[in-house]
Image (tube, rainbow, N blue to C red):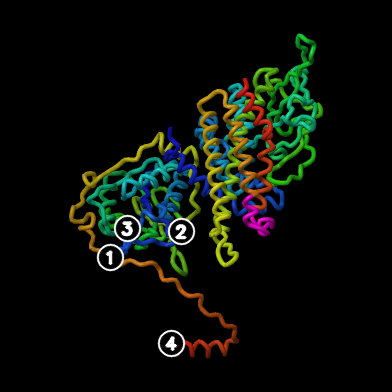
């Protein structure tokens, strides 16, 4: 069985987001990490590998320095790594990104593709399902559990108030939630192997199969970002201790005061 | 000459730091307070390969270099010196002598289980009457048919009760030199927990590294197989001394980690703590102290890393190890004492990590060769 996990190097937003004066993300000022949902997807793939001996390939599109997250994935246990990088692919939105990744995936054999639900730098949750659409395979999103049974996957799909158990025949694509598992640590020996024994395969535009230049990079991106900004921090709020009747009156008065009702 | 780390060592540091912050730090105060051996953390370290870092892959290890191992002890000790010494004693004092002096059968039998963390290792040289003067040891081993019979006791043994495999140094013969002076000939043995006649004495109540299991080992007609002899008979003393050279690099890394951890906390605290209307970090007294500590710590780190490199590339590295341990240990003690001072009253309260760090630092000047022994080793080489 062959599994491809799509991962993304993202700025660590835990310590807050930093912006350039022009409103774009100041990526250089933030630590680059493997996107948490993708890391959970990789762990799910590695658990399937532990159980069945599946071959796990990680793939990313990004700058040459995204090599770091591919090595990290191999240090966790992935067998192969592919970096898709090319100047003409820069500035891609979700459409151009998914087109690019699908173009790369057409070169590889796979039974299962796992992507993270969404990346913490864009939060769109669009790339995974779009890749499946480009490749013409089923997609199951928001996986909180993934099992392989014969030639099918059984996925527990999360909703706000319930979950669905969905069985799909492979090949298919699953998008993973970070709640799926706790990713394993790299091992020291895995790190040495990732740098000394293993190679990262580097592909450019010429290696993408069945894609149009008009669907790639900035010019192939229909999304136009007018402005990006950090979340506005809410105030501490107000706490009052009242009995239920008084509470209702208090809230109603407040809502009227603010012209909500 | 290159002082930078390459990418794989940088990534290894990231791994050790993340593990230490997530798995070790939250337990550090509790481990100190309860004096309980952190078996859960050790199990997690085993799973992540931390118990066999410099061991070749064919013996179940990670196939990394001594520098990577040293960085692991350093990062663990930044948050918990107990955890640092567990890894150091296991790796440097038990696995290393078996890898260096063991037969292929001994390596297959013991190193594989030790490097994967299935088993834990310890080393027993010190005796109640023989510390720095290791030649004063009394424990004896006598060959009786197909078995060695051990009698005596060892004290202050790290990983004492929790280990499964022990390297034990014992007298196997006494000879006279030409002038008629008696000379003890020591040999090294691999003793497994559960060997008949092998038991544990008192658990030591210590000033620091309180989660580390420090016990007395008692051998009463303890019978072990003939092939438990490690290295040639009569070569136990040089084996012990060479083993300690490696061990000292591990302890130097532990001391370095303690100092770095204390400085990290001092930087954070002095920026927050306000006196006379401004943070104490804004006072020049604090700034100069932080600067002195940072410079000293970096010097210690260079000595420790240099010693790790010497272990990789040289057969003998006694002087490099002695310099690293001497300087790192005294740095740990000086830095933690200064950091407690910067914390003022809060530094003396157990709730704050720096109080524990100061207590933990002291042992690095004592075990695996006191600072005085390190000075003897260094000056001995200078005046040779």
- How many numbered marks, from 0 up? 4
Q: Nearer the viewer, mark 4 or mark 3?
A: 4
Instruction: Indicate whether residue B331 is drawn in magenta.
Output: no
The chain letter for the residue carrying disc 4 is A
How far is disc 1 from disc 2 in space, using C-alphas?
Answer: 31 Å
Residue found at the far right of this picture: B220
Which label was assigned to residue A258?
4
Residue B279 coordinates in the image, percent (x, y): 55, 62
The chain letter for the residue carrying disc 2 is A
Which label was assigned to residue A225?
1
Up-down relation of residue A31 to residue B309 (above or below): below
Which residue position holds label 3? Answer: A127
- Judged from the image, the secondary structure of the residue bearing numbered disc 2 is strand
Sequence-first disc among 4 and 3? 3
Q: Nearer the viewer, mark 3 or mark 2?
A: 3
Q: Nearer the viewer, mark 3 or mark 1?
A: 1
Residue A16 coordinates in the image, percent (x, y): 43, 62
Question: Residue A54, can we see it?
Answer: no
Up-down relation of residue A142 to residue B129 (above or below): below
């Amino acid at each position: 069985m062959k599994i491809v996990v799509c991962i993304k190097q993202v700025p660590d937003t835990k310590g807050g987001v930093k912006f350039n004066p022009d409103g774009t993300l100041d990526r250089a000022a933030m630590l680059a990490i493997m996107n948490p949902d993708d890391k959970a997807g990789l762990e799910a793939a590695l658990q399937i590998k532990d159980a069945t001996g599946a071959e796990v390939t990680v793939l990313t599109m990004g700058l040459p320095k995204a090599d770091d997250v591919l090595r990290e994935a191999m240090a966790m246990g992935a067998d192969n790594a592919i970096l898709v990088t090319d100047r003409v692919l820069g500035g891609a939105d979700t459409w151009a990104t998914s087109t690019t990744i699908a173009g790369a995936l057409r070169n590889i054999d796979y039974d299962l593709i796992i992507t993270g639900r969404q990346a913490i730098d864009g939060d769109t949750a669009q790339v995974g399902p779009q890749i499946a659409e480009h490749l013409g395979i089923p997609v199951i999103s928001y996986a909180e559990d993934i099992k392989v049974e014969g030639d099918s996957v059984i996925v527990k799909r999360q909703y706000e108030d319930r979950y669905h158990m969905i069985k799909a025949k492979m090949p298919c694509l699953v998008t993973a939630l970070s709640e799926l598992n706790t990713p394993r640590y790299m091992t020291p020996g895995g790190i040495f192997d990732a740098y000394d024994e293993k190679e990262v395969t580097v592909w450019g535009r010429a290696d993408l199969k069945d894609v149009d230049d008009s669907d790639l990079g900035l010019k192939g991106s229909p999304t136009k970002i007018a402005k990006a900004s950090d979340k506005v921090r809410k105030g501490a709020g107000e706490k009052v201790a009242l009995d239920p009747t008084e509470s209702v009156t208090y809230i109603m008065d407040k809502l009227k005061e603010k012209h909500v009702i | 000459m290159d002082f930078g780390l390459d990418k794989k060592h940088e990534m290894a540091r990231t791994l050790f730091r993340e593990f230490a912050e997530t798995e070790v730090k939250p337990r550090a105060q509790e481990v100190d307070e309860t004096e309980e051996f952190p078996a859960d953390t050790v199990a997690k370290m085993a799973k992540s390969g931390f118990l066999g870092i410099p061991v070749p892959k064919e013996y179940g290890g990670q196939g990394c270099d001594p520098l990577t191992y040293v960085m692991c002890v350093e990062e663990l000790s930044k948050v918990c010196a107990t955890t640092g010494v567990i890894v150091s004693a296991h790796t440097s004092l038990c696995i290393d002598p078996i890898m260096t002096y063991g037969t292929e059968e001994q390596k297959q039998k013991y190193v594989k289980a030790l490097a994967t963390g299935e088993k834990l290792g310890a080393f027993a040289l010190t005796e109640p009457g023989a510390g720095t003067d290791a030649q004063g040891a009394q424990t004896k081993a006598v060959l009786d048919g197909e078995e060695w019979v051990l009698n005596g006791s060892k004290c202050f043994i790290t990983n004492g009760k929790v280990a499964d495999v022990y390297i034990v140094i014992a007298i196997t013969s006494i000879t006279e030199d030409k002038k008629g002076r008696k000379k003890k000939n020591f040999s090294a043995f691999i003793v497994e927990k559960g060997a008949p006649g092998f038991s544990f004495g008192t658990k030591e109540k210590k000033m620091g590294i309180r989660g580390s299991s420090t016990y007395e080992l008692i051998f009463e007609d303890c019978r072990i197989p003939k092939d438990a002899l490690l290295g040639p008979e009569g070569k136990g003393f040089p084996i012990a001394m060479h083993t300690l050279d490696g061990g000292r690099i591990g302890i130097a890394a532990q001391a370095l980690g303690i100092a770095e951890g204390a400085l990290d906390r001092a930087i954070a605290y002095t920026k927050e703590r306000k006196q006379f209307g401004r943070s104490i970090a804004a006072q020049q007294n604090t700034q100069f102290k932080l600067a002195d500590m940072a410079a000293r710590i970096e010097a210690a780190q260079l000595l420790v890393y240099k010693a790790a490199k010497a272990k990789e590339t040289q057969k003998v590295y006694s002087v490099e190890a002695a310099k690293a341990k001497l300087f790192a240990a005294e740095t740990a003690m000086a830095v933690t004492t200064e950091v407690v001072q910067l914390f003022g009253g809060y530094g003396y309260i157990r709730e704050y990590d720096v109080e524990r760090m100061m207590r933990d630092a002291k042992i690095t000047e004592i075990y695996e060769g006191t600072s005085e022994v390190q000075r003897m080793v260094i000056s001995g080489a200078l005046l040779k």
